[in-house]
Amino acid sequence: MSKLLMFGLLAVIVYLILRGAGRRQRKPPPAPPTQKMVACEHCGVHLPESESLKSGEQHYCCEQHRGLGPLER
């Protein structure tokens, strides 16, 4: 009976060691790519540059704000 308990304990220890070794080998998931944020020249809302409407060097959040132009502050 004691041999069976020792074999079971040894099997559990080997399982835990192998499971832990598998975890250490995994690489963390890559970070999502970052995007440059810009502010709308009219209202000041921040949005990704790829989603903004560009007029010259100025960025806008929508067509209406692009038509109104930059807001005087």
Image (tube, rainbow, N blue to C red):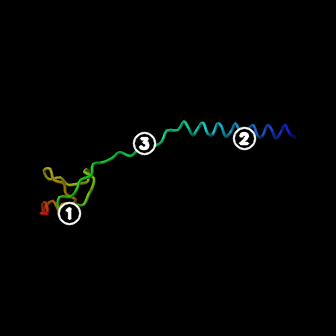
* Callout 3 secondary element: loop
For mark 1, what is the residue?
Answer: 43
Question: Which disc, if any, is residue 12?
Answer: 2
Q: CA distance from mark 2 to mark 3?
A: 33 Å
> Helix or strand or loop: what does disc 2 sit on?
helix
> How far, Cα to Cα, is label 2 from label 1?
63 Å
Residue 21 picture location, percent across and down: 60, 36
Q: Amino acid at mark 1?
A: Cys
Mark positioned earlier in the residue sequence (2 or 3):
2
Query: For mark 2, does the 10 Å Cα neighbourhood hold few (<14), some (14 to 19), or many (20 or more) residues?
Result: few
Q: Residue furthest front?
A: 73
Locate residue 49, reporting x and y percent.
25, 51
With 12 as the anchor, is 31 left or right in this view?
Answer: left
The secondary structure type at the circle numbered 1 is loop
Mark 1 to mark 3 CA distance (whole Å): 34 Å
Residue at the spot x=30%, y=48% of the render? 35
In the image: residue 4, left or right of residue 22: right
> Looking at the picture, which amino acid does disc 2 mark?
Val
Label 1 crowd (10 A; few <14 / some 14-19 / many >=20): few
Q: Residue at x 65, y 37 (%)?
A: 17
Identify the image quadrant of residue 16. top right
Dot 3 corresponds to which residue?
30
Q: Residues within 10 Å of mark 3 (few under 14, many from 20)?
A: few
Q: Is residue 70 above or below residue 19?
A: below
Contact flag, marks 1 and 3 (Cβ < 8 Å): no
Q: Choose the circle earlier in sequence order: 2 or 1.
A: 2
Say which amino acid is labelled 3: Pro
For the C terminus, give its image quadrant: bottom left
Which of 23/73 is in front?
A: 73
* Residue at (80, 38) in percent of width and height: 6
Q: Say which quadrant the N terminus sits in.
A: top right
Most foreground residue, 62 or 33: 33
